[in-house]
Amino acid sequence: MATILYGKRIRCNVELPYTQSLLLYAYQVSARSLVAALREAGHERIKPKHGAVFANIDAAGTRASLLAERAGIGKPAMGEMVDELERMGYVRRIPDPADRRAKLVLPTDAAKAVTDTVHRFNQALEAEYRGKLGDKGYEALRAALLELAPSRDPQPRMPQGDAD
């Protein structure tokens, strides 16, 4: 199947009649590539959903409830992800010094290795985008996305982490 984009016929396995479809398709391609990079780096069991933890956890630890809030997901879903990542050795729970009844989710060295891999992947992807679009096209893409995304978000928030 093919679709027309900027006057060019591109091959893809889905029809992309709407901009939203293009954005989703680009995300899915990127997510699959990231999973492949993580597997290549030895993190075979990490899935895109785990990004909700890795993107929102502080080096000194973060309560699971705050992770859920930052990620915009429910506490039970976050709890399941934290349990899974703890079993895999990417996080551990420690008592919160501010409230011994609460626990902090603390990233391990394995989590740091994941975030390092993701950072390298993102840097390479940004360079690829800039190379394909040129400086002006790249900056226009970023400006357009920054303009569009918050206009549709009922609870505006910027993702954690940096893009460089």
Image (cartoon, helix red, strand yellow):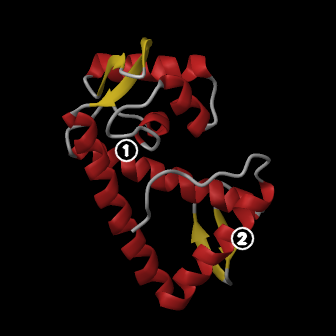
Which element type, helix, strand or loop, lies under badge 2? helix
Per the rendering, the mark at residue 130 is: none
Which element type, helix, strand or loop, lies under badge 1? helix
Q: Which residue is mark 2?
A: 147
Corner quadrant of residue 109: top left
Corner quadrant of residue 146: bottom right
Query: The residue under label 2 is which amino acid type?
Result: Glu
Corner quadrant of residue 70: top right
Above or below for 116 versus 64: below
Kindly report the distance in space between the C-alpha atoms of the residues bearing marks 1 and 2: 28 Å
Query: The residue under label 1 is which amino acid type?
Result: Val
Q: Which residue is mark 1?
A: 35
Image point 55% across, 82% down: which residue?
Answer: 139
Image point 55% across, 52% down: which residue?
Answer: 159
Left or right of residue 102, residue 142 in this image? right
Q: Is residue 16 visible?
A: no
Q: Residue 138 location, x and y as percent?
A: 52, 81
